[in-house]
Amino acid sequence: MKSNYHTVAACLTLFALAAIIPAHTAGGADNPTPKKKITMQNWGEVEGQPVSVYTLTNNSGMTAKIATYGAILTELHVPDKIGAIGDVVLGFDTVGEYVKNSPYFGATVGRVANRIAKGRFTLDGKEYTLAVNNDVNHLHGGVKGWDKKIWTAEARDTPAGASVTLRLVSPDGEEGYPGTVQASVTYTVLRDSNTLRIEYEATTDKATPINLTNHSYFNLKGDGDVYVHEATLNADSYTPTDATQIPTGTIAPVAGTPFDFRTTHPIGARIRDTGGDPLGYDHNFVRNSPETFGLAARVSEPFTGRVLTMSTSEPGFQFYTGNFMDGKTVGKRGVVYATRGAFCLEAQHFPDAVNQSAFAPIILRPGETYRQRTEYIFSLSK
Ligand code: BGC
């Protein structure tokens, strides 16, 4: 009798739960906590195509939102030292603003992140001409890079944590690149730590360059400039650039330069000495021990106590301090973003690698699989 009562009660509870969790909610079934780990919402349309946003959460206070437009990380919420949860990436409230306005906020950048000199390269004896969209150079995949495409998405609650995989087919000839590429990017909010893991894969039917990254603009305080954020970069060298931001080909030691973050420095301390126009960091750093997955950078913010550590499989990373931000962009929740109001840590192979024999190659050939893994790990300073 008693056990029947329990069976009926359990059935009713399950029925009630099924009624409140929408059909599009994935995951959570094998999770001990009642909170939904993955939800999906419609987020309007771009060129008549529906766009969705997936929300991934863990039990330690991390929530990530990822849009199918551009496979963009639109929000990333983490706790500060008093337990207040805050959004630490820049972005917009609506997809329309990303279409109109975005300097690659949170975007998945491809087929090749960063610059290719004059939008030209030669591969297997054939010269290719790409879209030129940054002064005289090609930047971040061209006029309509992968950050402006609608990806398909599939969410799953995995043993590692709540996860969404976005997929894209990039046709032969897109932005001037050879080969049809099948690409995926998987975002996972780890179950047991406040870590956002991003994994990329790509295959092709013709040899083509591939160099994917995430272009999140971080501000560990939420807004304002990032001058007092303190950075430590695991890089003994960097790749100096010419006036159009193309690497000269030299791999130069950071010692004795404002690029030496081997010991911790506030981001703003030596920004005037960087020499760029506009001033600021916008450089590729050569990660120490580049052959193995490992530490690239650690950035902390003294008031909130938030610490971001980035580890990656990539040999380099672009450290960019939002120098081109004009101080007028109105972002999420109506916040006006300051110039140098964020820092980006774009894990990648080196810029213009396709034209530079001293840099690790980025050519993917049929039968091979490109793989990239980057983790953004959040903690609190002592
Ligand atoms: C580049 C910057 C550029 C920014 C936004 C960064 O990866 O290095 O020069 O302004 O992306 O496009």
Image (cartoon, rainbow, N blue to C red):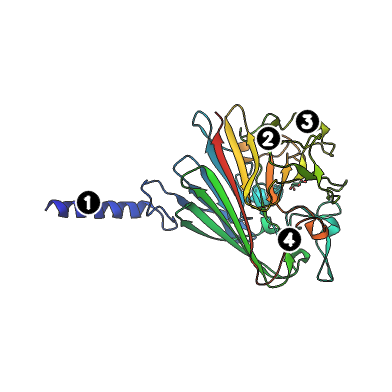
Disc on the earlier residue, 3 or 4: 3
Q: Secondary structure at mark 4?
A: loop
Q: Is residue 356 above or below residue 322?
A: below
- Indicate which label's residue lies in the foreground, 3 or 1: 3
Instruction: Compute the Cα span from label 2 to label 4.
Output: 28 Å
Question: Mark 2 CB in 8 Å range of ligand 1?
Answer: no
Marks 3,4: beta carbons within 8 A: no
Q: Secondary structure at mark 2?
A: strand
- Indicate which label's residue lies in the foreground, 4 or 1: 4
Q: Residue at x 78, y 32 (%)?
A: 271
* Rendering coords of residue 123 (x, y %): 80, 68
Nearer-the-camera pick, 92 or 153: 153
Q: Which residue is mark 4?
A: 362
Q: Residue at x 65, y 45 (%)?
A: 216
* Rendering coords of residue 257 (x, y %): 81, 35
Residue 95 left/right relative to 268 = left
Residue 138 left/right relative to 14 = right
Nearer-the-camera pick, 81 or 256: 256
Q: Amino acid at mark 3?
A: Arg
Q: Secondary structure at mark 3?
A: loop
Marks 3,1: beta carbons within 8 A: no
The image quarter in which residue 128 lies: bottom right
Q: Which residue is mark 2?
A: 231
Q: Which residue is mark 1?
A: 9
Disc on the earlier residue, 2 or 1: 1
Disc on the earlier residue, 3 or 2: 2
* Rendering coords of residue 277 (x, y %): 84, 39
Q: Is residue 271 above or below residue 177?
A: above
Q: Which residue is mark 3?
A: 270
* Rendering coords of residue 132 (x, y %): 82, 57
